[in-house]
Image: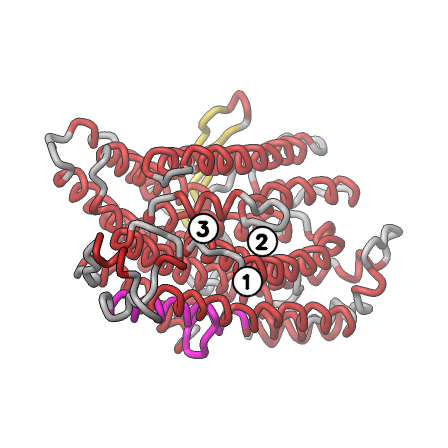
């Protein structure tokens, strides 16, 4: 582990929160001062994130870096313990970019602007805290704190059914979070020494039965947030009622916390149980992809169609996590980064469209390409990235996952073929429901009643800037994936090595729940050779 004298990560966590505290006291009548202040704070935080990693992070080191540990509440074993590695660093950067742009996207908020921007900055701190926490109880606290701002953003600035959507969101996610707390204390009390430190918990020698139970608890908690079928029903309602800035963060950052948790806890800390659950994750990923893709066809609401598209795309993350290969796990991380950018762009543009039309019903739109050519161009680019057009980040992420899973020697050829073929159905369906969405909204004849009632102005400079800030990295990663993969390659090699090293050991265990016909006999020599070549 690499520590540093200056507490960079503590500053990154606390700065947005501290910056939000003066907002209620700023002299401001119409919200102009508040929004400029919030944007300045967000830009400063993002600049600090870039500077910290540029100057003090080593891309070649798979271990934790910038390690800080302070005793917080020793009576209950809680420490302020933070660090970053290749898994968390790219997601912290993603959080910084999307949250900063989401604050800029809320520029037109007139209702309670002080509270709005206070919540955005407070949520910024909690999100960073989730990705850098090295104490499991501290992780849980940060995980819970980011739920409250999202709940308030939906319930105060949401649509007509905002109370229902916000309540459903908080109930699902808060109940799911309890499983993290239960698992944390169960692991902490296991064995002779009590600890909540994530690294120390990962080194404990758990029984296989205990690992399976804890893995199940984490899977439920993260399955609600990802979300995994059948815990997904809160997401379409939340997206359809949330304001555009909240939707950007919800799709771009919050869903990625669950994927991060699955890799950090379920694979790294519980590798023995992962061997048994990995086929389940692959099957659940396929269910997510096919179910959400088919359900997206039935949606007449623009945001609900995009919400189900998000569920489908997160299914690919599950398949990558289940692959047992460096390529597959690397693809899962790349898919999280890629989908974060794409989903944030599409939900922002859906908010821009709603500001003009005052409706999300696609059957009431039509012919808007002539009125809003820039919005149409940006929406088309985002949709093409989402359907995995070559040259964009979505294509690279999904292709890497497919290659990682098909080249895995942990599964039988029959199981691999079934998963890949079924997942490919989603690849076929996504262009259909996304392009039909574009056709309904932007092509065809105009809704005369709607155009007479509202003025359809094209994208303003601020809106075009936000869209470009998201679309440029989407294209850049699609053309040159190393821009993203170099930040976590060393870490994913280490994670895959750890996961694969337990395969021969588990094969000797008496519990063989999912072994035939899912798993092929592990070949340790082949694994070692592949991992060595990938590490080079």
- Residue drawn at (37%, 60%) of the image: 346
Q: Which residue is mark 1?
A: 332
- State which quarter of the image contains the C terminus: bottom right
Residue 468 in view: yes
User: In the structure shown, which secondary structural element does the residue marked by tag 3 occupy?
Assistant: strand
Disc nearer the start of the sequence (3/2) = 3
> Toward the viewer: 69 or 153?
153
The CA distance from mark 2 to mark 1 is: 9 Å
Magenta residue span: 373-398
Q: How is the image coloured?
A: secondary structure
The CA distance from mark 3 to mark 2 is: 14 Å
> Relative to 358, is 510 on the left or the right?
right
Q: Which residue is mark 2?
A: 263
Question: Which mark's residue is nearer the viewer, 2 or 1?
Answer: 1
Tell me whether the residue at label 3 lies in contact with that at label 1, contact meaning CB atoms closer than 8 angstroms: no
- Residue drawn at (55%, 62%) of the image: 332
Q: Residue furthest front?
A: 449
Residue 485 in view: no
The CA distance from mark 3 to mark 1 is: 18 Å
Question: Which mark's residue is nearer the viewer, 3 or 1?
Answer: 1
Tell me whether the residue at label 3 lies in contact with that at label 2, contact meaning CB atoms closer than 8 angstroms: no
Disc nearer the start of the sequence (3/1) = 3
Disc nearer the start of the sequence (2/1) = 2
From this view, report whether residue 309 is shown above or below residue 141.
below
Q: Position of residue 406 (x, y in %)?
A: 67, 74
Q: Which residue is mark 3?
A: 84
> Relative to 237, is 11 on the left or the right?
left
Quarter of image, res 468: bottom left
> Toward the viewer: 451 or 324?
451
User: In the structure shown, which secondary structural element does the residue marked by tag 2 occupy?
Assistant: helix
């Amino acid at each position: 582990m690499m520590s540093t004298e200056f507490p960079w990560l503590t500053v990154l966590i606390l700065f947005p929160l501290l910056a939000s505290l003066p907002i209620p006291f700023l002299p401001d009548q119409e919200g102009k001062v508040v929004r400029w202040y919030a944007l300045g704070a967000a830009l400063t935080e993002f600049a600090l994130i870039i500077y910290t990693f540029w100057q003090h992070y080593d891309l070649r080191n798979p271990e934790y870096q910038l390690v800080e540990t302070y005793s917080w509440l020793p009576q209950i074993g809680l420490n302020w313990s933070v660090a970053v590695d290749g898994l968390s660093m790219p997601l912290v950067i993603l959080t910084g970019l999307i949250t900063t742009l989401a604050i800029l996207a809320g520029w037109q908020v007139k209702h309670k602007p002080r509270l709005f921007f206070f919540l955005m900055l407070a949520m910024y701190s909690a999100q960073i805290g989730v990705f850098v926490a090295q104490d499991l109880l501290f992780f849980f606290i940060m995980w819970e704190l980011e739920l409250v701002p999202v709940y308030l953003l939906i319930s105060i600035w949401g649509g007509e059914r905002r109370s229902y959507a916000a309540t459903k969101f908080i109930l699902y996610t808060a109940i799911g979070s309890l499983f993290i707390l239960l698992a944390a204390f169960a692991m902490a009390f296991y064995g002779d020494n009590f600890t909540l430190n994530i690294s120390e918990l990962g080194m404990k020698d758990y029984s296989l039965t205990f690992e399976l139970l804890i893995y199940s608890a984490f899977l439920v908690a993260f399955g609600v947030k990802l979300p995994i079928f059948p815990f997904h029903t809160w997401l379409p309602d939340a997206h359809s009622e949330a304001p555009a800035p909240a939707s950007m963060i919800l799709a771009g950052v919050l869903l990625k916390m669950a994927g991060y948790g699955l890799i950090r806890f379920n694979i790294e800390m519980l590798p023995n149980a992962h061997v048994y659950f990995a086929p389940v994750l692959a099957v659940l990923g396929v269910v997510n992809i096919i179910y959400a893709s088919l359900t997206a066809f039935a949606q007449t609401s623009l945001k609900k169609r995009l919400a189900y598209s998000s569920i489908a795309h997160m299914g690919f993350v599950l398949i990558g996590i289940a692959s047992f290969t460096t390529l597959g796990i690397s693809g899962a991380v790349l898919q999280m980064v890629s989908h974060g950018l794409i989903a944030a762009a599409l939900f922002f543009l859906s908010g821009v469209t709603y500001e003009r039309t005052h409706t999300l019903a696609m059957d009431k739109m039509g012919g808007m390409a002539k009125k809003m050519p820039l919005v149409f161009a940006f929406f088309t680019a985002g949709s093409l990235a989402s359907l995995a057009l070559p040259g964009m980040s979505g294509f690279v992420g999904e292709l890497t996952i497919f290659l990682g899973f098909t080249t895995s020697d942990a599964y039988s050829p029959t199981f691999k073929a079934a998963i890949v073929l079924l997942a490919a159905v989603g690849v076929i369906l996504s262009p259909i429901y996304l392009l039909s969405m574009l056709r309904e909204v932007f092509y065809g004849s105009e809704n005369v009643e709607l155009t007479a009632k509202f003025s359809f102005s094209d994208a303003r400079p601020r809106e075009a800037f936000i869209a470009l800030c998201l679309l440029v990295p989407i294209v850049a990663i699609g053309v040159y994936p190393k821009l993203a993969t170099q930040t976590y390659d060393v870490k994913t090699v280490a994670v895959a090595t750890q996961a694969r090293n337990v395969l021969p050991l588990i094969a000797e265990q008496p519990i063989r729940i999912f072994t035939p016909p899912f798993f092929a006999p592990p070949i340790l020599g082949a694994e070692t050779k592949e991992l060595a070549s990938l590490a080079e």
